[in-house]
Image (cartoon, rainbow, N blue to C red):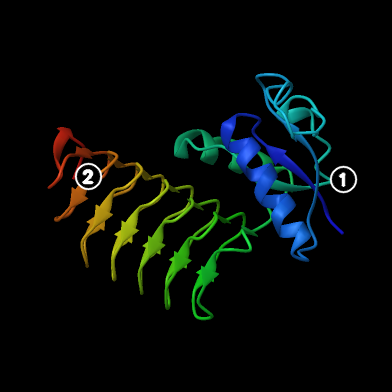
Amino acid sequence: MPKVAIVGGGALGREIHSWLCAAKAAGAPLDPIGYVDDGGPLMEGFAGVDLPYLGMIDALDIDKFELAMAIASPAAKKIVGDRLGARGGRFVTLVHPSAVITHTATLGEGVVIGPQAYIASHARIERLALVNSLSGIGHDVIIGACSTISSQVDITGHVIVGAGVFMGSGARVLPGVEIGEDARIGAGAVVVRRVKPGQTMFAAPARVLLEGSD
């Protein structure tokens, strides 16, 4: 059974630990054995989390472990993921046992799918993207690499989400909309039209908060 080191020791790291434990209990060959974080032993003192701190991220002997990404920030996730990948790090694809993944959906390396999420027909979730709990990814949707989709997000059919996008809890994206890379969608926003790369959108319907580039 692969020994898995969690990359990130914050709140998401604790969530990923619980999801790994649930997956292991359901028969997945994943054994969480510790975590790394440049901020130190951040999980210490939390009830029910008995996971050793393995040290700084770059000090991890990646030949001994597979990796589970637990960094929410798309930019930081890309930096750390690329750095570890260049050293030969292998990221596990983690699906909580309560999630529903249709047989025609595609999950890339290191993708994490949270509890009760739904990934519809022919959706594609790319490398190191996170789809958090209770979120729905519609048919033919593309979620770009290193994006973070928070809880209770509704992404309807034929939406394209670029790489490095962060989408806040409860956001909704209407069919066929394209969201450019590195965009930020605020919690509860309803996105009805194209979002330019780097834009920040909020409210319902979503309005421009910070301009991006074409």
Q: Label 1 is placed on what type of residue?
A: Lys
In what quadrant of the picture does the N terminus appear? Answer: bottom right
Counting from the top left corner in percent of width and height, residue 121 is at 42, 78
- Mark 1, secondary structure of its residue: loop
Nearer to us of marks 2 and 1 is 2
Q: Position of residue 102 (x, y in %)?
A: 50, 77
On the rendered structure, is 102 left or right of 29?
left
User: Residue 166 sits in which quadrant?
Assistant: top left
Q: Residue at x 45, y 68 (%)?
A: 119
The circle drawn on residue 189 is 2
Name which residue lies at 77% across and 58% down.
24
The label shown at residue 64 is: 1
Residue 213: mark? none
Q: Amino acid at mark 2?
A: Ala
**Residue 91: image x %, image y %?**
68, 52
Q: In the figure, residue 188 lies in which quadrant?
A: top left
36 with respect to 210 (left or right): right
**Label 2 neighbour load within 10 Å: few <14, some 14-19, many 20+:** many
As drawn, is 119 to the left or to the right of 49? left
Q: Nearer the viewer, residue 68 or 44?
A: 44
Bin the neighbour count of mark 1 within 10 Å (Cα to Cα): few under 14, some 14-19, many 20 and up: few
Among the 4 quarters of the image, the one containing residue 43: top right
- Whether the residues at callouts 2 and 1 have beta carbons within 8 Å, the answer is no
Say which of 73 and 97 sits in front: 97
